[in-house]
Image: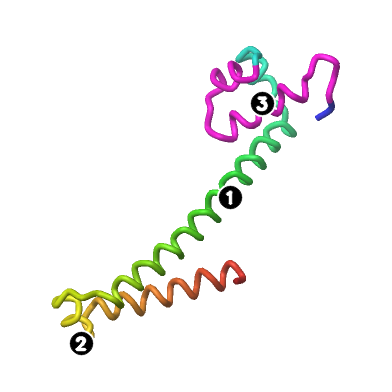
């Protein structure tokens, strides 16, 4: 997208950002200071639609990465809490090898699979 004297590129980037984050055509138009017809016209162009899709994918990938990292951290905390549990019920379940232990094993297996898929 080239820039012209009217700041078309800047407006286009505002439209792309708005649409990629879930705004409607009306909302994107308002954010970019253009008409809804302008947004619709830009979205009728293949390259522009592709740019919106790429931006949306970039945002989703970032969110996915954050969620995976936070899920791994949460799993670590839960495993630590379970290991240090002082509740008689938890200790009894651990001694018996009940579902708590199997859940811990499943959690470790899942964490290892996620880490392998992330290449870490």
User: Can you identify the residue that label 3 sits on?
Assistant: 14
Q: Position of residue 20 (x, y in %)?
A: 59, 35
Q: CA distance from mark 3 to mark 2?
A: 59 Å
- The residue depicted at 77 percent of the width and 20 percent of the height is 8
Q: CA distance from mark 3 to mark 1?
A: 19 Å
Label 1 crowding class (10 Å Cα cut-off): few <14, some 14-19, many 20+? Answer: few
Q: Secondary structure at mark 3?
A: helix
Q: Nearer the viewer, mark 3 or mark 2?
A: 2
Q: Which residues are magenta?
A: 3-32
26 displayed left or right of 14: left
User: Can you identify the residue that label 1 sits on?
Assistant: 62
User: Can you identify the residue that label 2 sits on?
Assistant: 95
Q: Are marks 3 and 2 in contact (CB under 8 Å)?
A: no
Q: Nearer the viewer, mark 2 or mark 1?
A: 2
- Quarter of the image where the C terminus is located: bottom right
Q: Position of residue 70 (x, y in %)?
A: 47, 58
- The residue depicted at 54 percent of the width and 20 percent of the height is 27
Q: CA distance from mark 2 to mark 1?
A: 41 Å
Label 3 crowding class (10 Å Cα cut-off): few <14, some 14-19, many 20+? Answer: some
What is the tally of numbered marks visible in this picture? 3
């Amino acid at each position: 997208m080239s820039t012209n004297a009217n700041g078309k590129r800047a407006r286009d980037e505002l439209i792309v950002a708005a649409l990629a984050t879930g705004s409607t055509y009306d909302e994107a138009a308002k954010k970019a200071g253009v008409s809804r017809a302008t947004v619709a016209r830009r979205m009728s162009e293949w390259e522009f639609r592709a740019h919106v899709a790429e931006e949306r994918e970039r945002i989703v990938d970032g969110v996915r990465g954050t969620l995976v990292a936070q899920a791994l951290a949460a799993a670590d905390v839960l495993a630590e809490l379970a290991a240090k549990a002082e509740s008689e019920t938890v200790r009894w379940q651990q001694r018996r090898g009940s579902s708590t232990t199997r859940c811990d094993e499943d959690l470790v297996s899942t964490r290892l699979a996620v880490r392998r898929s992330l290449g870490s």
